[in-house]
Image (spheres, rainbow, N blue to C red):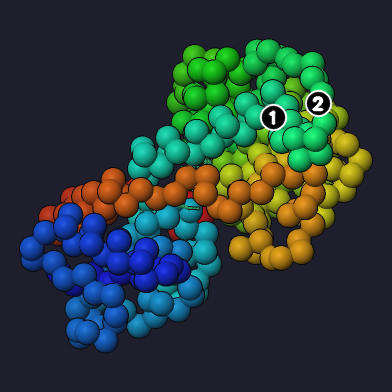
Amino acid sequence: MNLFLCGSWDDDERDAWAEALRRALGPGHRLLLQRGEVDEASIEVAIVANPPPGQLRGLTGLRLIQSLWAGVDRLLADATVPPEVPVARMVDPAMNAAMAETALWAVLSLHRGFFDCARQQRDGRWHQAPQRRADEVPVLVLGTGQMGRTAAARLAQQGYPVTAWGRTPSEPIGHGVRTVHGDAALAPALAAARTVVNLLPLTDATRGILDARLFSALPAGAAIVNLARGAHLVEADLLAALASGQIAHAVLDVFAVEPLPAGHPFWAHPHVTVLPHVAAQTDVRSAAEVVVRNVRALASGAPLAHRVDRARGY
Ligand code: NAP
Ligand code: GLV
């Protein structure tokens, strides 16, 4: 089978993926890094990492587009991606675990005031602020999918009272996690939260959800942790909410424009912590196995795992 690998990456990253995928695929498969190497109609699988638009145009033989990224919003927004070809996204427990670690680090650092301590250190200032217990810091996780569930469970294990909000009723997540769903459940969940962790997919319904309206539904001095997509956040609304004190601090891993442009107000904001989109990187070793399982499913006619509902957008 001919497979085509493409993405937005540097040569070293691409080569690491190519090596891991070739090893996992084994003989009988040809992984191409350039399209011109074979008759393009013979390429049956595209393995993609957030590719720039247009990379799959004209690949008429495609039977599967397998994303190495969990979020497929950019891929689905590419009008040149053939609409009839199934898209599968990356779902990997190693990635979910990494995301849960980042969520825990952010919530714990906010709750214990460690971002303030880092600022105090820069200023050479010694100040011991009073602290609360974890069970006094309710956390709202937006999204009850792969990442939301894992993060919610991890936070609850750490003693935080956790509510997880989804679109539809969710399977129970575990001890200490209350699940709610639907638009009507959001405002009361926000009113009861001190920290919001966003792990929603980017869709028409969720674009701009972290806006002035959502911030004003939180208790004053709440915190925002955005680990999902930059376009979930209305940046100007966050800056206004930080200025008024409605939001005390924001931890942001994702941005409308990445890399975050030099001079952007978030870089130097005393109450914004910037991460360079590293909340949950795809693990080459385990993810290559996920890809190969789907390639084998395609070859044998078995159902594909983690198919994206293209109408729903995730
Ligand atoms: P997922 O498994 O598809 O889960 C999506 C969840 O969001 C589901 O629970 C879904 O509810 C819920 N949802 C969708 N639309 C909703 C709406 N309108 N209102 C309320 N809930 C809604 O996604 P995932 O794999 O957990 O990924 C979560 C996010 O993390 C994505 O944005 C992804 O791009 C991002 N991500 C970021 C990084 C990083 O490094 N920063 C890494 C990987 C992924 P239902 O189940 O009821 O449909
Ligand atoms: C990273 O953001 C991903 O979607 O995998």
- SS of the residue under disc 2: loop
| Farthest-out residue, right | 244
Asked if 67 appears above or below 148 in the picture, the reply is: below
Mark 1 closeness class: few <14, some 14–19, many ≥20 residues within 10 Å: few
Q: Which mark is residue 248?
A: none
Q: Quadrant of residue 133?
A: top right
227 and 18: which is toward the camera? 18
Residue bearing the label numbered 2: 126
Residue 95 location, x and y as percent?
41, 42
Residue drawn at x 18%, y 62% as measured from the top left: 22
Residue 175 location, x and y as percent?
49, 14
**Mark 2 or mark 1, earlier in chain:** 1
User: With 13 as the anchor, is 183 left or right in this view?
Assistant: right
Residue 185 location, x and y as percent?
68, 29
Quadrant location of the N terminus? bottom left
Q: Is residue 215 in sight in this rendering?
A: no
61 and 37: which is toward the camera? 37
61 and 283: which is toward the camera? 283
User: With 141 as the anchor, is 55 left or right in this view?
Assistant: left
Residue drawn at x 47%, y 45% as measured from the top left: 280
User: With 149 as the anchor, is 41 left or right in this view?
Assistant: left
Q: Amino acid at mark 1?
A: Phe
Q: Quadrant of residue 8?
A: bottom left
Q: Amino acid at mark 2?
A: Trp
Residue drawn at x 79%, y 16% as measured from the top left: 130
Asked if 191 appears above or below 277 in the picture, the reply is: above
Asked if 138 appears above or below 206 in the picture, the reply is: above
Residue drawn at x 83%, y 50% as measured from the top left: 239
Residue bearing the label numbered 1: 114
Q: Quadrant of residue 161?
A: top right
Mark 2 closeness class: few <14, some 14–19, many ≥20 residues within 10 Å: few
